[in-house]
Amino acid sequence: MNASNRKNPFSVGLTGGIGSGKSTVADLFATLGATVIDTDMIAHQLTAANGAAIAAIRSTFGAAYITESGAMNRDKMRKAVFADPTAKGRLEAIIHPLIRAESEHAAAQASGAYVLFVVPLLVETGFWKQRVSRVLLIDCPEDMQIRRVMQRNTLTEAQVHAIMATQVPRADRLAAADDIIVNDSDMAALLPQVQRLHQQYVTQAQAGER
């Protein structure tokens, strides 16, 4: 828990590796009354046609990284980021401050029992670990992550391994978590975990915890 953060109301940072089920769990929290702010969704809006990040991306990477419709060329950028860590850093320097600003704007207007930020790279970024009151990890075995992503995105096992290699190890996510939801079964096993934590978070938010 981040006890030093006194200016923001109680909030939760939801994270997990690719294929862990972050979106499914976030949707369940939303139905129970949490305000969900998805940073991936914000990133897509920023890099969509005429999004707020497009001008800086064009200036930094060149017009070749912008599609005819005015959006970021995601395939080309993905290849550049995988091939060159400095490209990843330049892209993050553009997008991350904008994501934070949009997230704070959305949080200021939140009407739910508490705010739940969905942040895939929460453990990797110091800002979010300090920003949220609790870190919630959605966890599952790595072989299950691989199967889910292969089925969902029609990627090869080698491609999924390459993506996972760019994320922090599972052990690091587990060590950083205040709360853990195990998503290795079905909805019948998942829902009670969400309901229990939702009630805990409502209680903490009502108590004025930060």
Image (spheres, rainbow, N blue to C red):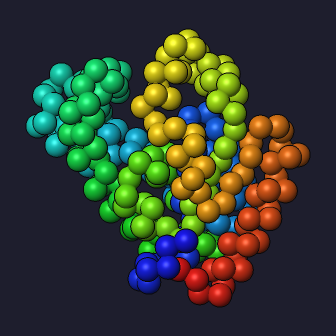
Q: Residue at the location (43% across, 68% down)?
A: 131
In the rendering, at what x and y percent does residue 140 appear? 69, 38
Q: Residue at the location (44% across, 84% down)?
A: 6
Q: Residue furthest right?
A: 188
Residue 36 at least partly seen: no
Q: Residue at the location (50% across, 79% down)?
A: 3
Q: Residue at the location (20% across, 39% down)?
A: 90
> Where 151 falls versus 111 (above or below)?
above
In the rendering, at what x and y percent does residue 74 appear? 35, 27
**In this rendering, position of residue 155 left or right of residue 138:** left
Image quarter of residue 149: top right
Image quarter of residue 145: top right
Q: Nearer the viewer, residue 76 or 143?
A: 143
Q: Nearer the viewer, residue 168 or 192?
A: 168
> Where 87 falls versus 150 (above or below)?
below
In the rendering, at what x and y percent does residue 11 appear? 55, 70
> Where 163 falls versus 123 (above or below)?
above
In the rendering, at what x and y percent does residue 62 appear? 13, 28
Image quarter of residue 67: top left
Q: Residue furthest bottom?
A: 207
Locate the N terminus by quadrant.
bottom right
**In this rendering, position of residue 188 left or right of residue 151:** right
**In this rendering, position of residue 56 left or right of residue 36:** left
**In this rendering, position of residue 189 left or right of residue 166:** right
Residue 186 at least partly seen: yes
